[in-house]
Amino acid sequence: MKRWEILCSTAVAVGLLLSAPVCPEGRGSDPASSPSAARPGPGLVVRGSGFGNSTRRERSGLPDSSSRNPSPESRIPAFRGSRAFDDLKRLVEFGPRPPGSKALAESRQWITGQLKQSGCEVEEDSFVADTAVGQVPMTNLIAKIPGARPEVLVVAGHYDTKRFDGGAFVGANDGASSAAFLLELGRLLGRRKNPVTYWLVFFDGEEAFRQWSPTDSLYGSRHLAAKLTANGELSRIHAMVLVDMIADANLDIRRDSSSTPWLTDTIFRTAHRLGYSRYFLDQPTAVEDDHLPFVNAGVSAADVIDLDYGPGNSYHHTTKDTVDKCSPASMTVVGRVVTATLEELENSLRAKH
Ligand code: 1BN
Ligand code: ZN
């Protein structure tokens, strides 16, 4: 039995005793409701708990920074890791998805269809990259979701997988998890009355073709940051939250020191408030990832990444990166933290003039 399953069966037993709802997704995938896992922090809204959308602090009349939300209808609906996990599995079924491959083109078509079903407009940002192995066509996908304000919040990930010679690398965690995460976010934001504009960005060409270096990596994000700088749209971006490798069943996310400190602080403070301190560890790590071209261009950007995948990181960039190493519960944790962070960012923008 996996750790999450154990946690959730414990939660079911305790839940039955306390008549409290557990595993609201009905698939054992929501540690938010597990008393033995992430105990809700003082500000956590447990949707469907019988308490409506009020927090424990709100009910007790205590001030709470998270209750700055002006109205319940402005909340982002609950992120469901089980739906994201279904998409992760579907993406893996396309097989290895390196840049320029037929499988990546097929997965791009499928992603676009899913986003359109969610009510999102989808833009393709196609270009030819000069890579370590020659010219490769690449396409970033951008789901643009309008909002009342012109400021843009970007949530991004990559959907390509690493080109691999030694067997089939399907990138369940490294590639599929971030794309699947963005698809679930598209379902939550696509038809919402958003107070700000959202761009969900699926980067192509995140991975190195030969050896990771400044010129052999991050092809899609380098291209988009340069393009948005040139056309003047970069200045619309208030913040970018990047997610990568967030479905690891053994979730441990550290603070990336290449990210913008205030944004990392907001994400980790939110995680702690929601009771997820065991998954968001206040330890530093330095990551080169798709946020870097944006940080370098002056955008506030933070990478939410679990770079400790398998014993001694032994599943990272190996054929062991498969669905069985991933968990819907981890996606729920990250989804709840990111959506709560987005609400914080929306509120801080609302508070501006
Ligand atoms: C993340 C996922 N990265 C590549 N795939 C960035 C990275 C590069 C992380 C090198 C660690 C080492
Ligand atoms: Zn990778």
Image: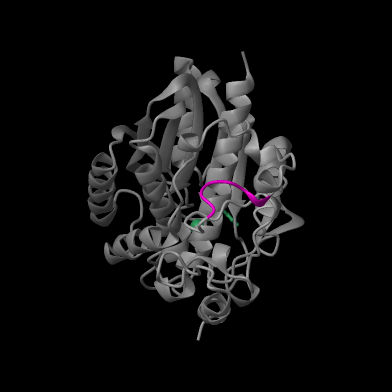
Quarter the C terminus occupies = top right
Point 29% across, 48% down: residue: 111
Q: Is residue 235 visible?
A: yes
Relative to 70, is 193 on the left or the right? Answer: left
Q: How is the image coloured?
A: one colour
- Image quarter for residue 130? top left
Q: Position of residue 17 (x, y in %)?
A: 56, 80
Q: Main secondary structure of the magenta part?
A: loop
Q: Position of residue 212 (x, y in %)?
A: 56, 52
Q: Is residue 287 above or below residue 16?
A: above
Q: How many marks?
A: 0
Relative to 175, is 312 on the left or the right? Answer: right
Point 34% across, 43% down: residue: 136
Residue interval drawn in magenta: 51-56
Q: Is residue 221 above or below residue 7?
A: above
- Membership of 26 in magenta stretch: no
Q: Nearer the viewer, residue 184 or 347?
A: 347
Q: Position of residue 69 (x, y in %)?
A: 58, 34
Q: Nearer the viewer, residue 307 or 135?
A: 307
Relative to 40, is 143 on the left or the right? Answer: left
Point 44% across, 31% down: residue: 198
Q: Is residue 317 visible?
A: no
- Membership of 55 in magenta stretch: yes
Outermost residue to the bottom? 1
Q: Is residue 195 above or below residue 244?
A: above
Outermost residue to the top? 353
Q: Nearer the viewer, residue 205 or 30?
A: 30
